[in-house]
Amino acid sequence: MLQRYVDQIKEADMVLIGIGRELSAKNLIPMDSDEVRNYYKEKDMKGYEQLLAAEEGPERDWMLEVYYRNYLLTMEKAPYFDELCKALEGKNYFVITSNQDNLLYKTDLKEDRVVAPCGTGEFFQCEKPCEHRIYPALPGIRDLIDYYEKTGEYEHLQCPKCGRNFVFNIRTNETVSSYLEEGYLQMWGKYTKWLQGTINKKVLILELGEGFEVPSLFKWPFEKIVFYNKKSHLIRVHEHLYQIGEELRGKAETAAVNSKDFLTMKEEN
């Protein structure tokens, strides 16, 4: 568990964290979880329950995603990363995530030390981009929910330039060719500059919950850093895909446990 590695974190000059799907919002807070359902019940909003019970289909799935994103964007705190935040206090760190939610921005992590190249759900974009422009999503999300609560009808927002539907500015298998990168490029520049400073430094790399969804984003780059930087060390955590190659033997270790449990469970004495 994380407690086992706190001393290594403290001793490192720099700490690099990668956060993958095991720690995504849909794994930590499923759409049908009591946490989300009670949020809308307390607001006396019946649409979410109706959508959960409705037959699956593109329009229903779109509207369900709108409600779910509203919950994620308006939640006050994501407690799942509290122990990680405590372990990183006072450290020179950077966090990169392949998840398409904004949970890490609901923690005590410094916003200027987190990069989310696959999007956060905070923006809309044209489904077939007619220009490189993204739009804040929350105002439109609220309008869509208000309309559905009043009418029970599905609706979309349209791009003001070409009239095509808006979609969330997130990178998925379906949107990989149309995903606009404007939302994260500034932070990506800070991240790559930070990485340049890891040369010849004692770097601890903690890879949490990344399978092979987007291995080119940080799984393979992490391995490359550890291979070339003799002062670096990798800890790979995943319930199933925790293996490391022979070339990293002695420079990496694994924890065959779900990353949520790794961060939240206490070790027994």
Image (cartoon, rainbow, N blue to C red):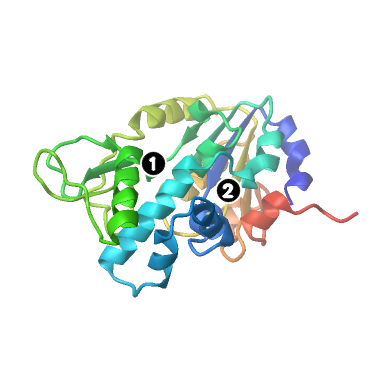
The spot of residue 78 in percent (x, y) is 59, 44
Q: Nearer the viewer, mark 1 or mark 2?
A: 1
Q: CA distance from mark 1 to mark 2?
A: 16 Å
User: Label 2 is placed on what type of residue?
Assistant: Glu
Q: Identify which residue, 165 or 250, lies in the foreground.
A: 165
Q: Identify which residue, 260 or 148, lies in the foreground.
A: 148
Q: Secondary structure at mark 1?
A: loop
Residue farthest to the left, as pictured: 162
Task: Identify whether 12 is placed above or below 36.
Answer: above
Residue 169 in view (yes/no): no
Give the residue displayed 65% in from the left and 31% down from the top: 202
Task: Identify whether 121 is placed above or below 114.
Answer: below
Q: Report the residue marked by disc 1.
A: 117
Give the residue displayed 37% in from the left and 60% down from the top: 64
Q: Identify which residue, 14 or 167, lies in the foreground.
A: 167
Please say if the residues under marks 1 and 2 sit with CB atoms less than 8 Å apart. no
Q: Quadrant of residue 81?
A: top right
The spot of residue 258 in percent (x, y) is 63, 60
Q: Quadrant of residue 150?
A: bottom left
Give the residue displayed 67% in from the left and 41% down from the top: 82
Q: Quadrant of residue 57?
A: bottom left
